[in-house]
Image (cartoon, rainbow, N blue to C red):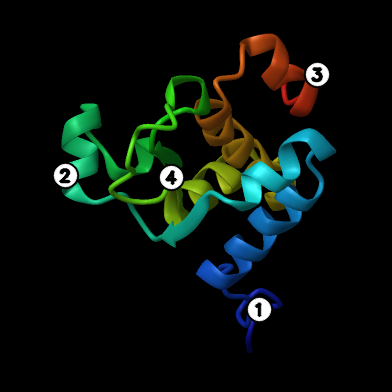
Amino acid sequence: MTTPHASLTAPDADQIEALARAAIAELPLPYREAAQQVALRIEDFASDEMLAELGCESPFELTGLYDGTPLTEKSVSDQPLQPDMIWLFRCPILDEWVERGNVTLQKLVAHVLVHELAHHFGWSDEEIGAIDPWWE
């Protein structure tokens, strides 16, 4: 006899990316277009190099990462070596989602994405709260 959950599978990278793209589409207009210019990568976990650089002891500690130069620090004379990028780490996000049990996966992905976009835009805590009322 199979259980009702036997056929369930964890959301894959494409599904996480679709949730992140939907969250970008929901951003206020002043930020939406600029956020669409940031590259988005979904990986199961951060690389060992990323984890070591950030001092993470477990790969489950890191749900997302912004890699780039914040808009508040960019200069027109800077020649970027690579595009600004937001990494979302699928397994740690899913682990947190299951652990929390009180938030939808869409809201959690949006929260992680907004936090990483905050690094890109140079947002203050108040600006983050206006976009992502996570703590309400």
Q: Which residue is mark 4?
A: 84
Q: Are marks 3 and 4 in contact (CB under 8 Å)?
A: no
Disc 3 secondary structure class: loop
- Image coordinates of residue 79 in percent, x first then y, are 32, 41
Place of residue 7 in the rendered image (x, y in percent of width and height, measured from the top left): 63, 82
Give the residue displayed 74% in from the left and 44% down from the top: 32
* Relative vertical location of residue 17 with respect to residue 12 in this rendering, above or below: above
Nearer the camera: disc 3 or disc 2: 2
The image shows residue 118, relative to residue 49, as above or below, that is: above
**Amino acid on which the number 4 mark rests in the picture:** Asp
Callout 3: 10 Å neighbours few (<14), some, many (20+)? few
Query: What SS does tag 2 mark?
Result: helix
Give the distance between the C-alpha atoms of the residues marked 2 and 1, in whole angstroms: 40 Å
Q: How far apart are labels 1 and 3 at the CA level?
A: 36 Å
The residue lying at 63 percent from left, 85 percent from top is 2
The answer to which of 17 and 71 lies nearer the viewer is 71
Going from N to C along the chain, the mark reached first, 1 or 3, is 1
Q: Which residue is mark 3?
A: 136
What residue lies at 41% left-to-right and 39% top-to-bottom?
65
The amino acid marked with disc number 2 is Glu
Q: CA distance from mark 4 to mark 1?
A: 44 Å
* Labelled disc at residue 49: 2
Residues at marks 4 and 1 touching, judged by CB atoms closer than 8 Å: no
Residue 3 badge: 1
Q: Nearer the viewer, residue 80 or 25?
A: 80
Instruction: For marks 2 and 4, give the CA distance.
Output: 18 Å
Mark 1 burial class by Cα count in 10 Å: few <14, some 14-19, many 20+: few
Which three-letter amino acid code belongs to the residue tagged 3? Glu
Mark 4 vs mark 1, foreground winner is 4
Mark 1 or mark 2, which is nearer the start of the sequence? Answer: 1
